[in-house]
Image (cartoon, rainbow, N blue to C red):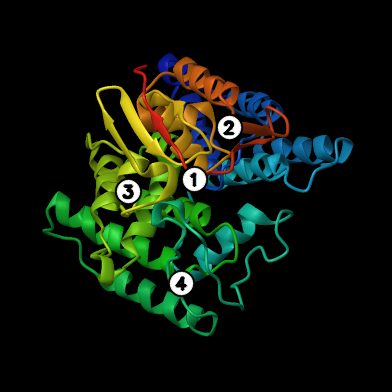
């Protein structure tokens, strides 16, 4: 958990700017279900206070993990900490060049020491099972065409004239460009975080006062919106849509008030396990387990989110569902007690597992 709100209220410009940068850097780790450590939050505060530089932040993190080597293969806290520090440093710099080379360099700077392929364009084809697509994948660029496709997209954007566009047209144009370079998926891992950082810096050069808090609190929505902008299944009347990304960028660029809910981005199917549900004023009827279990609508919503990403934090789910964090924690505890949810690993570095589904039904019992 992190909260840098006090720096925003104090009115000291430098501390306020740094706190917003750190909020975005830490929030973007949620794209991959990662949570930075308490040590990173403490170190970030020292940087915001002006006690240590970004270089010293990175040095302290290196020393910290040398003394505490990761013991479990699925523990990605070190990645979350170090990439957060790298993002904060990059976002704090005023230098920027609009080019594919800059895009690739940002990936290198974010993931050096984390991935062996940091700053390298992938040379293999990929697929990624997506919760928002019920397990299907977006078709990403062929590895043999990545460089040429990147060059083309950048040249088209560089030549585009934004003058005389309405706010809505600006939002849609930028959403189209960002979704395009994201879909190329130039990197094996870290693609969304790199695209987000590049986008923030590019928008600043266009004169936009980018709201970093939006990335801090809605990074998972940002990724889901990118997926929906690049997926089609005409047989089932599913078409690529910029609607979700337009909502995000409308809020980002012009301080819009669009509601951003991850569950709204999900492709609807006739039968998709635990999400085959109807929720009305606190009641949930859900099909999917070995026995009949009563769930409230909040418990059902938590279960649905954790089924998609077991590493989501209580804060992540609170933002998406529209409940306070204490309510979310009570819901997860209740689900665990009812035997439909299991915690794997520690509270800090572990994840939630939705237990095996079978036949049966669940009926809500209010809050």
| Residue at mark 1 | 308
Looking at the rendered structure, the secondary structure element under dot 2 is strand
Q: Nearer the viewer, residue 286 or 233?
A: 286
Q: Is residue 101 above or below residue 170?
A: below
Please name which of the two marks, 3 or 4, marks the residue nearer to the observer.
3
Under circle 4, the secondary element is: loop
Looking at the image, do the residues carrying marks 3 and 4 touch, with CB atoms under 8 Å apart? no
- Marks 2 and 1 sit apart, C-alpha to C-alpha, by 13 Å
Q: Residue at x 79, y 41 (%)?
A: 62
**Name of the residue lying farthest toward the bottom:** 144
Front one among 27 and 22? 27
Instruction: Tell me the mark number nearer the camera, choosing from 1 and 3.
Output: 1
- Label 3 – label 4 distance at C-alpha: 19 Å
Q: Which mark is residue 140?
A: 4
- Give whichever of discs 4 and 1 has the lower sequence position: 4
Between label 4 and label 1, give the one nearer the viewer.
1
Q: CA distance from mark 2 to mark 4?
A: 33 Å
What numbered label is drawn on residue 265? 3
Contact flag, marks 3 and 2 (Cβ < 8 Å)? no
Q: Residue 179, position in %: x, y? A: 36, 62
For the residues labelled 1 and 3, say whether their Cβ atoms are less than 8 Å apart. Answer: no
- Dot 2 or dot 1: first in sequence order is 1
Crowd rating for badge 2 (residues with CA inside 10 Å; few <14, some 14–19, many 20+): many
Q: Quadrant of the C terminus?
A: top left
Q: Is residue 203 left or right of residue 185?
A: left
């Amino acid at each position: 958990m992190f909260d840098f709100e006090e720096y925003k209220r104090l009115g000291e410009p430098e501390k306020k700017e740094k706190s917003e940068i750190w909020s975005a850097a830490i929030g973007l780790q949620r794209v991959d279900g990662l949570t930075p450590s308490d040590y990173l939050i403490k170190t970030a505060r020292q940087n915001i206070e002006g006690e240590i530089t970004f270089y010293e932040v990175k040095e302290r993190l290196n020393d910290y993990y040398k003394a505490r080597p990761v013991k479990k293969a699925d523990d990605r806290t070190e990645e979350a900490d170090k990439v957060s520090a790298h993002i904060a440093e990059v976002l704090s710099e005023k230098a920027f060049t609009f080019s594919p080379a800059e895009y690739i360099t940002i990936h290198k700077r974010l993931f050096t020491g984390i991935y062996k392929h940091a700053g390298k364009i992938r040379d293999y084809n990929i697929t990624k099972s997506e919760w928002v697509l019920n397990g299907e994948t977006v078709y990403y660029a062929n590895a043999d065409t990545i460089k040429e496709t990147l060059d083309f997209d950048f040249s088209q954007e560089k030549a585009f004239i934004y003058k005389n566009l309405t706010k809505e047209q600006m939002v849609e144009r930028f959403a189209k460009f960002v979704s395009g370079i994201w879909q190329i998926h130039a990197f094996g891992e870290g693609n969304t975080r790199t695209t987000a950082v590049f986008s923030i810096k590019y928008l600043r050069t266009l004169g936009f006062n980018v709201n970093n808090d939006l990335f801090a609190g809605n990074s998972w929505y940002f990724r889901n919106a990118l997926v929906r902008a690049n997926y089609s299944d005409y047989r089932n009347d599913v078409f690529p849509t910029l609607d979700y990304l337009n909502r995000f960028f409308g809020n980002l660029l012009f301080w819009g008030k669009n509601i951003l809910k991850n569950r709204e981005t999900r492709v609807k199917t006739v039968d998709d396990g635990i999400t085959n549900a109807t929720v009305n004023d606190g009641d949930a009827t859900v099909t999917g387990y070995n026995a009949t279990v009563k769930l409230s609508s909040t418990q059902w919503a938590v279960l649905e989110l954790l089924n998609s990403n077991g590493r989501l934090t209580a804060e992540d789910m609170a933002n998406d569902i529209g409940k306070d964090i204490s309510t979310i924690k009570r819901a997860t505890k209740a689900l665990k007690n009812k035997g439909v949810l299991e915690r794997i690993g520690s509270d800090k570095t572990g994840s939630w597992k939705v237990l095996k589904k079978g036949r049966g039904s669940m009926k809500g019992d209010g809050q």
